[in-house]
Amino acid sequence: MADSPSSDLWRISEFERVRAQALSSAFSSLDAPTVLPTTLLADLRRLDINGNRGDVLEVAAACMRNHEPALLCFEIDAKVWPVTLFPGQMLYHSPRGLANAGASVLSRLKLLRVEPPGVRPPGHWMHERVAEVEHYRPLGPLLWSLAIEGPRVAVLTEIAGTVAYRAIRSPAEDGLALGGAIRSAADRLRRETVSLRAISEWPGMSIERASRLLNGLYLNSALLATRAHPAARERKSAGWLELLGWPKRS
């Protein structure tokens, strides 16, 4: 069975029934790998230890760091939305496009499972496991949308802490949608190396918006993060929760 039996999304009950019968994935084929690569598994286990097991963006970031494909099973409105990430080809496979689903959907995404991919990317020599070409889509816009509109409001762990940031290119160059304060901040970040706190104080920005911008840039390989720059040591007194990207408590 490929990543999806049809263009329709599965109900949670059907997904769990098929998975129980197969004693493994509800989406894997008979010759698909049964386990994820060791390096990715180790990264995912660290997320478990840190309490980020179900964090959609952290798991996507782990796949990108390890350059390993993985099937992410999301839950939305009692349906299972299977999305296979292919970092090496910067593509994702899904029965429906997710990048343009909007904040009303992306903000409510829940991660059910992370599994080995049931399909291969286009052009792979195992052509029998390559799915319909129309179900493959550019990965960059999806990662950007998950960062800007998804459930995570804090900076990703990998780039959090006492860090200074600079954008190495504009998201617009990659065809990513920007608007308002996010666009202005992204342009300014190409000219300045600054802390999260400094970005949050730019017009129209906040800790959450700054965090989302940095996450989107990082996932699209457009962010330089350094702990050596003087700006990284600014305002240590802001509090460790804020420096990690969590909103200040009122």
Image: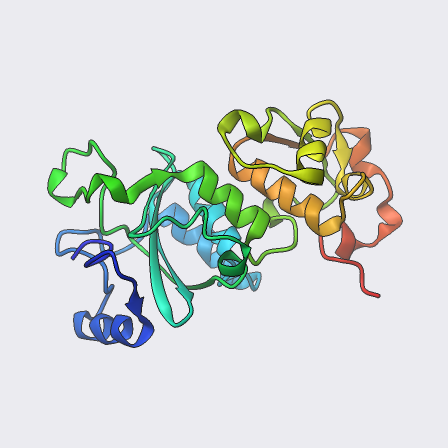
Left or right of 146 in this view: 80: left
Q: Please provide percent x and percent y for residue 108.
A: 51, 64
**Quadrant in the picture for the N terminus:** bottom left
Please give the name of the residue rendered at 17% of the width and 69% of the height, measured from the top-left corner: 22
Between residue 168 and residue 63, name the one nearer to us. Answer: 168
**Quadrant in the picture for the C terminus:** bottom right
Between residue 180 and residue 221, name the one nearer to us. Answer: 180
Residue 234, picture quadrant: top right
Please give the name of the residue rendered at 59% of the width and 56% of the height, measured from the top-left corner: 152
Colouring chosen for the image of the structure: rainbow
Left or right of 149 in this view: 34: left
Residue 130, picture quadrant: top left
Residue 226 visible to the viewer: no
Residue 84 visible to the viewer: yes
In this rendering, the answer to whether 166 lies above or below 129 is above
Please give the name of the residue rendered at 27% of the width and 70% of the height, measured from the top-left corner: 15
Q: Please provide percent x and percent y for residue 38.
A: 35, 49
Residue 77, picture quadrant: bottom left
Q: Please provide percent x and percent y for residue 62.
A: 47, 47
In this rendering, the answer to whether 88 lies above or below 30 is above
Left or right of 10 in this view: 212: right
Number of on-image labels:
0
In this rendering, the answer to whether 85 lies above or below 230 is below
Q: Please provide percent x and percent y for residue 128.
A: 11, 43
Left or right of 128 in this view: 234: right
